Image: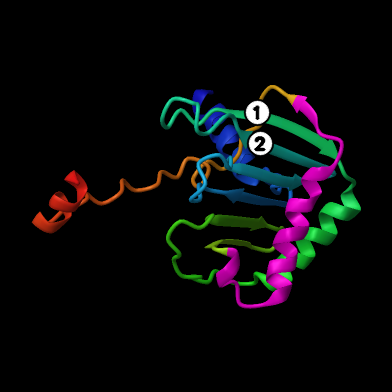
Amino acid sequence: MKRYVLLSLLVISCTVKQQPQPESLVLTVGSGINPNEPRFGIELKGDTLFYCEEINPRDSFKDTFLYKYSYCIIGKKKVKEMLDRSKAVFDTKVDYGHIADANYYQLDINTQVDSVKTTFYISNLETDNQKQVVYDIIAFKDCDLKPMEYHDFKSGILQYKLPPPPPVIMDEASRIIGKE
């Protein structure tokens, strides 16, 4: 009898279709040269925009990654249009180079067909269409945001730490000038 129950559970679990993940787009922004500019994240899913913003980046305890969360309903049509536009201009993962002290962006696009995850600096994007999509995603956060307790964002770039600065090496001439 036990074997029959176990076999039945196995057959049922293998035949149950998994629900597809909802389509979503997540744009996260890491630290830049200005310590007063907060890191933030925007997620578009369903008919909703979710937003998180770092709280007092300069004043908070180092690497605590404190965020405030909010959301607003923008409509399924706007979300779908932005997913389609984003997928069209960011169709593959591309390495967009490195710029010291610039804001680092990450875009995750998840559709029913496939997913694209790419990181970039806006100034290194290849086309004006790519830049415009990023600016349009960021503009969505200017909606009627309502606070919420928490929303789970992909945390990679939101918790990206800047490397420590290189040590300052002073030669003898610099030390003499500094004492004057």
Q: Give the range drawn in magenta.
A: 122-147
Q: Which of 154 and 55 is in front in this view?
A: 55
Labels 2 & 1 near each other (Cβ < 8 A) = yes
Residue shown at the point (60%, 65%) measured from the top left = 122
Give the main secondary structure, helix, strand or loop, of the magenta stretch.
helix
Residue shown at the point (66%, 36%) measured from the top left = 52
Q: Is residue 81 visible?
A: yes
Amino acid tagged 2: Cys
- The residue that disc 2 covers is 52
Classify mark 1: helix, strand or loop: strand
Residue 56 x, y percent position in the rendering = 57, 30
Residue 178 highlighted magenta (yes or no):
no
Residue shown at the point (64%, 51%) measured from the top left = 27
Q: Which of 123 and 93 is in front in this view?
A: 123
User: Is 134 left, or right, of 166 in this rendering?
Assistant: right
Above or below — where is 94 with respect to 29?
below
Residue 44 x, y percent position in the rendering = 75, 47
* Earlier sequence position, callout 2 versus callout 1: 2
Above or below — where is 121 with respect to 31?
below
Question: Crowding at label 2, few (<14), some or many (≥20) Cα neighbours within 10 Å?
Answer: many
Residue 156 x, y percent position in the rendering = 49, 45
Question: Crowding at label 1, few (<14), some or many (≥20) Cα neighbours within 10 Å?
Answer: some
The Cα–Cα distance between marks 2 and 1, rounded to whole angstroms, is 6 Å
Amino acid tagged 1: Lys
Q: Quadrant of residue 120?
A: bottom right
User: Is 107 left, or right, of 99 in this rendering?
Assistant: right
